[in-house]
Image (cartoon, rainbow, N blue to C red):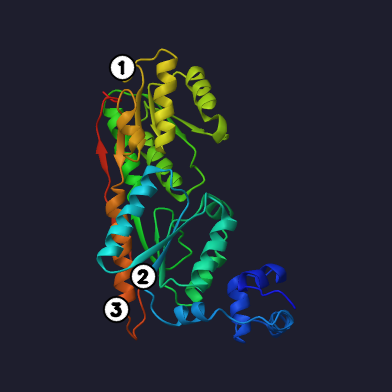
Amino acid sequence: MRKKVTLKQLAKELNLSISTVSKSLKNDSEISQKTINRVHELANFYNYKPNALAVSLKSNKTKTIGVILPEILNHFFAKVLYGIEQQASEKGYKIVTCITNESFEKEVEYVEMLNYSSVDGFIMALSQETQMYNRLYHVKELQRDDVPIVMFDRVSEEIDCDKVIVDDKYASKTAVQYLIETGCKKIAVISTIFDLSVGKLRLEGAREVVAENTDVGLIEFPIMNIEKEEDEIELFIKSNNIDAVLGLDETAAAIAINMSNKLGYRIPDDISVVGFTDGLLSKHSYPKLTTVSQHAEELGAKAADMLLERLENVSETKYSAKTEVVKTSLILRDSTK
């Protein structure tokens, strides 16, 4: 007696996506006849039968949405998730959350799994690998299947869907301008996220402000080894005569404070430090970190609202995607003058 197999196992054995196998079993015209034949042949060999529950769930509204996050230890994403869950729950929806840990392969697997099973739509921020590789076929497949998507924070211009973003470029300009106004002349931009869309926008904002101030210098320092970021930042500060740090992520800014303290610099008298994300590191660093608040909970609630509005107001007319921008705030604390 042959073993029972799942759709995921068929897909793995055929080296195809779950979505492609599912469409092949339905003889979808998007799939080549050669692929359809391969899928049917293996399905017949294993006497594969579709999961009746999954099929019924997929054909009806389940009041469930899929949330895909690149990480959860980051305070920003945790607060976004809280905002999504609160808003979804208020409207009678449940959420299923998957964490990619910045992996493109995991992101693809979770998208396919959730799309085949039980969710009515997706809220997602792209993983670091997805943005680095710029491989978006899994998201484009959702669009071809008319699955509603809302992207937030880490988004792609190639995907025409609803988006919720913060004014990253403007926020960075505001932070650097404040450093300049308080007397800083040699500003370091330190980050682990230069490859991400948000990191690029924040760096662009910093560059623009410095370009308008000819007596101010900018040093860009990408952290290459996450496991040794403390050592890298310590060596950088020791080797450069800087008077300010803009950390494009909260961790980089918090470590910059720690390493400056370790090297005997006074903060903010010798070095001013500004970070992004008003999380626990910002509030409990010594001195407390001046930071750009992205209002993550509000962002999550707005993303949920956009998705639920689309799910509950289905019409014959073509849906027009929109982008909502959440305004940031510069919260002044003891790490700046």
What residue sits right under mark 2 in the picture?
321
Residue shown at 74% from the left, 81% from the top: 45
| Dot 2 alpha-carbon crowd within 10 angstroms: few under 14, some 14 to 19, many 20 or more | few
The earlier-in-sequence mark between 3 and 2 is 3
Identify the amino acid type marked 2. Ala
Q: Are marks 3 and 2 in contact (CB under 8 Å)?
A: no
Q: How many marks?
A: 3
The earlier-in-sequence mark between 1 and 2 is 1
The earlier-in-sequence mark between 1 and 3 is 1
Residue shown at 51% from the left, 18% from the top: 239
Residue shown at 34% from the left, 36% from the top: 280
Comparing marks 1 and 3, which lies closer to the viewer?
3
Q: In the rendered image, which quarter is residue 19 located in?
A: bottom right
Percent position of residue 152, x then y: 39, 57
Compared across the picture, whether 50 is left or right of 82 comes to right
- Residue 53 vs 290, above or below: the answer is below
